[in-house]
Image (cartoon, coloured by chain):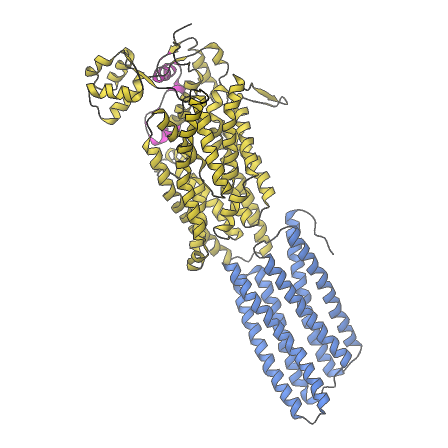
Chain colours: A yellow, B blue
Amino acid sequence: MELTILLFLSSGLFLGWSLGANDAANVFGTAVGSRMVRFGSAAVICGVFVILGAVIAGAGPAHGLGQLGAVNTLAGAFVVALAAALTVYAMTKLGLPVSTTQAVVGAIVGWNLFSGSPTNLTALARIVGTWISGPILGALAAFLLYRALRGLASHTRIHMLWRDLFARIGLIAAGALGAYSLGANNVANVVGVFVPSSPFVPLDVLGAFQLSPGQLLFLLGGIAIAVGVFYSRRVMLTVGRELLPVSPLAAWVVVVSQSLVLLLFSSTTLRQLIADAGLPPPPLVPVSSSQAVVGAVMGIGLAHGLKGIRQVKWAVLGHIAAGWVATPVLAAIGCFVLLFFLQNVFQQQVHQELRYRLGAEALERLRQQEVPVGELQPIAGHVIPGRTAFLEALRSRRQLPGPEEDKVLAAAELHPMRIAPARLGVLDPALLDADQIAAVRSLEGQAFDHKWQLAEALARAHVSWRPRPEAPHHALFNERLRDRLDYLYWTFRIPVGASPHAP
Amino acid sequence: MAEIRGSIFRRTRAMAATIDEFLDMVGEAGLAFEKGVHHYLEHGLDAVIEEKLAQISHLEGRADALQRTIETVLHTEMLIPDARGDVLSLLDDLDSLLDSIKSAFLALTIEHPAIPREHHDAMRELVTVSTRAVASAVSASRAYFRDIRAVRDHIHKIAFFEREADHTAIRLNRQIFASDLPLERKMHLRDCVRSIDELADEAEGVGDHLAIYAVKRSL
């Protein structure tokens, strides 16, 4: 079993390597491109902080299982990660900065197409939105920040060498922080899906602290990203030199601008803090660091007026934009082809067909949710394989509005789970707190057919498992709760065909 | 060659001080040249002139050493990558200016031209405006490191002093060639005037390059 997991894990680690080789350019590209930091120094600093971010903050439950959590078999996750990694690797060879997350989402779309699963159109709209909003917001932030700083700098009489030193320190500090958040935010996409099946046991580090199996997995993912960083020179030079030669001050502004844009428009933590303070939170806008950083470099060009615009290499920008569009498309096609091979040549189950049953409990739940279920009685109790077949059966009885149809799907989806004593041992204390683990333990031996049944049982067991009313200041809590529940759904899932109620 | 060691803050402070000291050497050499020529006009070739020559030679030697240190540190520490080439060219220009100051003064001590008293005022004026052009080039260079917006003002002064030096040199040459001096003395004095006037021209060259470096830094 462990060998299989390690084999499957290899594509996650390859994805990590590709991510490091591409996304390191977002945090150190301009520093290296402007020759303020040597590539070797940048790679070492970036690698160390990526690993720290991955182990310290990446294991936080806020990051859940990452995008790959949508794929419901390990073999499927292997292919999705492999397709995304190959796509990002190809883009890295071309020296183009692209979004790894978008490659993963593209590969998941390929998996959806192959498995007949529905594709969430909002995820695709988000990607397209990112191509527009990322560069615009990045450019705007860099334009304003650069103009302000340049105005300030022209009124100060600091020696060129001191400016150089401050810029260097600023670039290294901003790069290190960026690398930390790169590791923290992306390691879940790399190895998150393997957390419930982590082959590791807790490790005592010199008796000072203990690394949980999840943290060890995240450490491995962090190391994969860090190794990839050493291959990122080409992409770094595209961002930091080829697109537009930037000064040290501009190099710093680019890194800070993209971090600011990500923080302001995509950080749920910041939104939570702002909502807690009673202020209206900023709108959630889809942004990706790869797109924001390119936008920020353009913003520097715009800040110089016509002279700056003339200096921008538009052909390079065209290649980058083409890379953005090609990334999810290639990942989707690559994933589809690879899934075909793995399923038909290596006889691996790459997707698990969803099954639905409207049992008595599901109907009762729907009644509580004020969904009219009277006309659904004829299909009640039958196990219907496949989402499409279930929807056809449902629609033949009653046409429901979209949101109510989603409620029926969620209530009827079968996801057999059993709180097996052996699995209780693998619960990761880095992902769940003590009260939550105790609540899970109190359900030992119980079986559930639907995800919502486990969620309800846990909510009854302890207050920490209860979702809060939908409100901006509860958004982060509820998001974390969903991620933790996802972790449990994977951890206690039992194979297809087996009954959760069997001893 | 001096070495610059210590923490990055200490090294930066030391490096800034080294650049300032280099600029001081060029500025001092200009002042020493001016005083030396004025003394020569008053007293002719004497021990004071030899002392001034030794002083200028020492400044030139020290500036060479400082320039080598700056070049080495800028390269090995990868400092100011965006302006390193310009800074090194600027230091080369200033070093060349310092060499010209030394060469002009050395020529004076070797050739000790006999300058008729009626040309002393014009010669003094020429030396003064030429060395002011040199001083302005040093100020412009200093501003390039600390206050980029002030560079333009200093460059304007260099151009002014260079024009003044040209006018004075032409006037002086006219006076010399209108006099009854033998042709070989006229030609000797003309060379002497040219070597002093060329200091202002070189200072102007420094200013022209600095104007470009300053524009590059503002981009």
Q: State the quadrant of the C terminus of chain A.
A: top left
Q: Residue at x 44, y 9 (%)?
A: A444
Q: Residue at x 26, y 17 (%)?
A: A366
* Residue A428 in sight from this viewpoint: no
Look at the picture and state if A401 lies above or below B173: above
Asked if residue A118 lies left or right of residue A291, the reply is: left
- Considering every residue shown, the one lying at the far right of the view is B47
Along the line of sight, the residue nearer the viewer: A482 or A336: A336
Look at the picture and state if B83 lies above or below B158: above
Along the line of sight, the residue nearer the viewer: A270 or A306: A306
Image coordinates for residue A410, horizontal then vertical, percent: 31, 20
Magenta: main secondary structure: helix
Image coordinates for residue A456, horizontal then vertical, percent: 35, 16
Q: In the rendered structure, which segment of residues is drawn in magenta?
A: A448-476
Image coordinates for residue A93, horizontal then vertical, percent: 51, 41
Image coordinates for residue A105, horizontal then vertical, percent: 40, 32
> Is residue A166 within the magenta segment?
no
